[in-house]
Amino acid sequence: MPNRRPAITTTIEIEQQKLTASIGYDPSTGLPREAFFSARSKSGTLLDGMLYDAGVLLSIALQYGTPVTALAKSVARLEDGSPASPVGELIDVIVREVEAANQSNSEGATDADVPAEEGQAKEGAWELFTG
């Protein structure tokens, strides 16, 4: 991905705690390809490290073609279906962004998956293990 790319910044509030997160888009496709917490927690704390690492893992998943809806279904949820963590909340924001883009690009679109190029996920995963 290029060093400069479109992005949005949003505030996520969970358990009365506000966090700032950003979603970066691939300029050639308009699809979300990175996500991170830009204002996390006190530097050096466990929460700060965990949110940083979660952003890295989420970005790698998006870049290697993991459907964002699969991520949303895989994270912890509360009994009412709402996210149980800031990471789940950020994933839900990405789902809503993709759904909005799909609906504005083609009427009636309801699939919020971020499509991977054919074989991208499998080949990308192999690269992670082989360096």
Image (cartoon, rainbow, N blue to C red):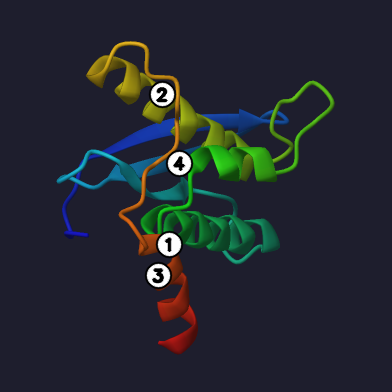
Q: Earlier in the sequence, mark 4 or mark 3?
A: 4
Image spot of residue 117 (x, y percent): 30, 54
How would you rate the neighbour count of disc 3 (Cα within 10 Å): few for under 14, some for 14-19, many for 20 or more?
some
Residue lying farthest to the bottom in this orientation: 130
Q: Is residue 118 left or right of residue 13?
A: left
How would you rate the neighbour count of disc 1 (Cα within 10 Å): few for under 14, some for 14-19, many for 20 or more?
some
Alpha carbons under labels 4 and 1: distance apart? 25 Å
Q: Is residue 42 left or right of residue 39?
A: right
Marks 1 and 2 in Cβ contact (< 8 Å): no
Q: Earlier in the sequence, mark 4 or mark 1?
A: 4
Viewer-nearest of discs 1 and 2: 1
Element under label 2? helix
**Amino acid at circle 4:** Ala
Marker disc for residue 121: 1
Marks 3 and 1 in Cβ contact (< 8 Å): yes
Q: Quadrant of residue 32?
A: top left
Q: Earlier in the sequence, mark 1 or mark 2?
A: 2
Marker disc for residue 124: 3
Q: Is residue 115 left or right of residue 54?
A: left
**Amino acid at circle 2:** Glu
Viewer-nearest of discs 2 and 4: 2
**Amino acid at circle 1:** Ala
**Which residue is labeled 4 in the image?**
21
Alpha carbons under labels 2 and 4: distance apart? 19 Å
